[in-house]
Image (cartoon, helix red, strand yellow):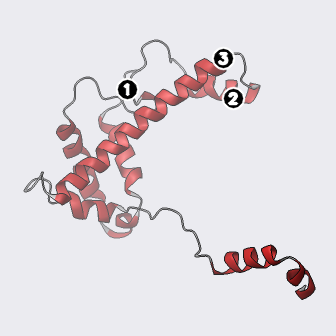
Amino acid sequence: MLRLLRNHPTACVLLLAVHWAPQSQAIELLTIHELVSHCVHLEKDPEGVDGQYCIRYIQGFIDGAVETDDRILQDMELGEGNLDALTERALRTRMLGWGNDYQPGSLAGFCLDDPVPLREVVDTVVADLITRDIGDLSGSPARVTVEDSLRDHYPCDE
């Protein structure tokens, strides 16, 4: 092994770099409790750092869901006739009743009719977050509660 490393200095450098490189980690999970610690300041100081953190997290979640829906629909249009059988079946079973009446977010399971004030949506989601900020639930991912709240309070018309 030593002879191999002496004859290939590049391999030696790469091996050392890999050995000393910091371990990569997944994005840190934002818990219900952590998000609530910002959202509790929303009513008193909505323009403050904590209030804005809370609002922008929920707004970003909604924007991400809408963008994902749009991408899925674009991919479907581009891939029509080129999808494998499994993908076509998955789309048929998961998107029953989908047609020209698509509403942004509907693939994610919630629909915000136009216009729903952002603050109204945020207040609704925050109430659910605060309700779940107890015991073992407080360490759960905030994104799950945000999604559940949006689905519960803003369902799509079937």
Label drawn at residue 80: 3
- Whether residue 109 is visible: no
The quadrant of the image that shows the C terminus is top left
Q: Residues within 10 Å of mark 1 (few under 14, many from 20)?
A: some
Structural distance between the alpha carbons of marks 3 and 2: 11 Å
- Say which residue label 1 marks: 156
Which comes before the other along the chain, label 3 or label 2? Answer: 3
Structural distance between the alpha carbons of marks 1 and 3: 25 Å
Q: Which secondary structure lies at badge 2?
A: helix
The quadrant of the image that shows the N terminus is bottom right
Up-down relation of residue 67 to residue 95 (above or below): below
Identified by mark 2, the residue type is Thr
Q: Where does residue 34 sit, x and y in percent of width and height?
A: 31, 65
Q: Are marks 2 and 1 in contact (CB under 8 Å)?
A: no
Count of numbered circles in the view = 3
Identified by mark 3, the residue type is Glu
